Image: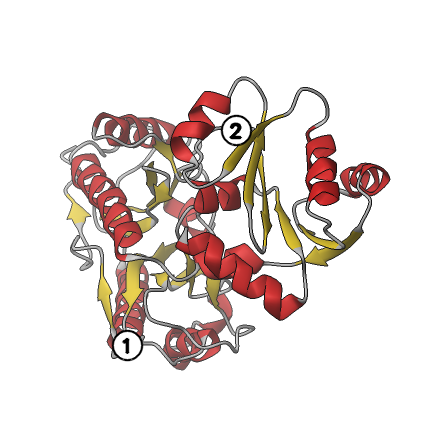
């Protein structure tokens, strides 16, 4: 129940009597619940898990330390009963997760002050335990095995979507429960699209191919990008590849606790800018991963908060030239007190697949 205790510390800081948790990722984080319906109420003394008849048995097994409450009617009516029983005067709610219509309904039912709270549990989730890091490592291992496999599958004449499907199914064979997001396979001039989800484009000789993918394993994600060529992609794309590769290495050399997200973002951005491609690097250098594919901390010029030990972040600089193609290389790093370590071991030097045509 350490995670619940951490929430209680925040209740004191925010002068709240209780917190209503409705974001299902946060529900899982706090209660270890893997179902799809339920919510959590944490007070200074109690922890409640509310769900319907479909999940009460599962909740009893998973949500250790929580009082399990079955709702027969509207789930928020059970929250109202808790508010009355425990004399809760103010209740925090997750303002980025509850719609205005739901807020209005809750406000009609619950007899206490509702206070919006932003990112309380999400901030706690940014710092991973060793157990969480071990699970992420397993998700990374599956992704890397998938990439090794797919390098032997790609050849001229097959479509991007065939590559994506093959990769997705292979990761599932290795134990993944689902993909982290729609797998990106962007070849040729489409590789200039940072989020070019796999299409029916046929991969051709001379194409640069970017694959951005990952998988869920025991609730946690991996996030990996590699770019390779099918045949010779030409001198400019090989030059761009080397710049991105060096930018990725520079981030890994300096990332550590105490650096801000903005400072780390600048390491990659400044290097790419110095080599003439600053305007072609439009996204951030990275982001946190965990229960969700995009979590804090952001490795972005907007983030002035310092990284801390056991943040797990992506390192993914890229360059994209419309009409030519693009390159992105992405690893998953664990931040340590004095540095970081890479959960990935896949080679990052440019791989050129001989087309055999």
Image: 353 above or below 331: above
Task: Name the residue located 78 percent from the left edge and 39 percent from the top edge.
Answer: 106
Question: Is disc 1 placed on a helix, strand or loop?
Answer: loop
Q: Earlier in the sequence, mark 2 or mark 1?
A: 2
Q: In the figure, is residue 69 to the left or right of 292?
A: right
Q: Do the CB atoms of the residues marked 2 and 1 lie less than 8 Å apart?
A: no
Residue bearing the label numbered 2: 36
Q: Position of residue 132 (x, y in %)?
A: 31, 51
Foreground residue among 270 and 206: 270
As rendered, which of 61 and 124 lies closer to the eye? Answer: 61
Query: Is 242 placed left or right of 357 in the picture?
Result: right
Q: Relative to residue 8, is residue 18 drawn left or right?
A: right
Viewer can see residue 154: yes
User: How dense is the environment of label 2, judged by Cα within 10 Å: few (below 14), some, or many (20 and up)?
Assistant: few
Of the 4 image quadrants, the one containing the C terminus is top left
Residue located at (37% from left, 45% from top):
188
In the picture provided, is 33 more to the left or to the right than 215?
right
Identify whether 201 is placed above or below 338: above
At 28% from the left edge and 77% from the top edge, which residue is drawn?
Answer: 337
Which residue is more in the foreground, 42 or 217? Answer: 42
Please state the horizontal and vertical placement of residue 186, each as a whole percent of the image: 39, 43
Residue at which label 1 appears: 337
């Amino acid at each position: 129940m350490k995670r619940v205790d951490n929430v209680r510390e925040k209740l004191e800081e925010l002068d709240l009597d209780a917190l209503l948790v409705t974001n299902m990722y946060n529900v899982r984080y706090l209660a270890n619940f893997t179902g799809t319906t339920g919510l959590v109420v944490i007070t200074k003394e109690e922890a409640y898990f509310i769900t319907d008849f479909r999940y009460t048995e599962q909740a009893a097994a998973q949500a250790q330390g929580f009082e399990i409450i079955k709702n027969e009617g509207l789930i928020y009516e059970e929250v109202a009963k808790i508010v009355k029983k425990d004399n809760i005067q103010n209740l925090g709610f997750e303002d980025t997760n509850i719609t205005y219509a739901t807020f209005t309904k809750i406000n009609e039912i619950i007899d206490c002050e509702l206070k919006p709270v932003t990112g309380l549990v999400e901030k706690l989730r940014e710092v991973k335990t060793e157990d969480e890091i071990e699970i992420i490592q397993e998700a990374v291992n599956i992704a890397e095995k998938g990439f090794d496999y797919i390098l032997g599958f790609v050849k001229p004449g097959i479509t991007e979507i065939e590559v994506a499907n093959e990769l997705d199914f292979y990761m599932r064979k290795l134990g993944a429960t689902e993909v982290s997001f729609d797998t990106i396979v962007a070849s040729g001039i489409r590789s200039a699209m940072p989020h070019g989800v796999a299409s029916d484009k046929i991969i051709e000789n001379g194409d640069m191919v970017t694959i951005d993918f990952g998988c869920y394993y025991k609730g946690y994600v991996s996030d990996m990008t590699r770019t390779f060529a099918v045949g010779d992609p030409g001198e400019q794309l090989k030059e761009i590849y080397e710049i991105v590769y060096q930018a990725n290495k520079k981030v890994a050399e300096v990332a550590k606790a105490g650096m801000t997200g903005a400072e780390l973002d600048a390491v990659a951005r400044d290097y790419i800018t110095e080599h003439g491609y600053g305007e072609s690097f439009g996204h951030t250098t990275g982001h946190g991963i965990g229960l969700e594919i995009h979590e804090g901390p952001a490795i972005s010029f907007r983030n002035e908060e310092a990284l801390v030990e056991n943040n797990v972040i992506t390192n993914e600089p890229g360059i994209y030239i419309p009409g030519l193609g693009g390159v992105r290389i992405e690893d998953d790093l664990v931040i340590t007190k004095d540095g970081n370590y890479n959960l990935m071991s896949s080679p990052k030097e440019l791989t050129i697949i001989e087309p055999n045509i």
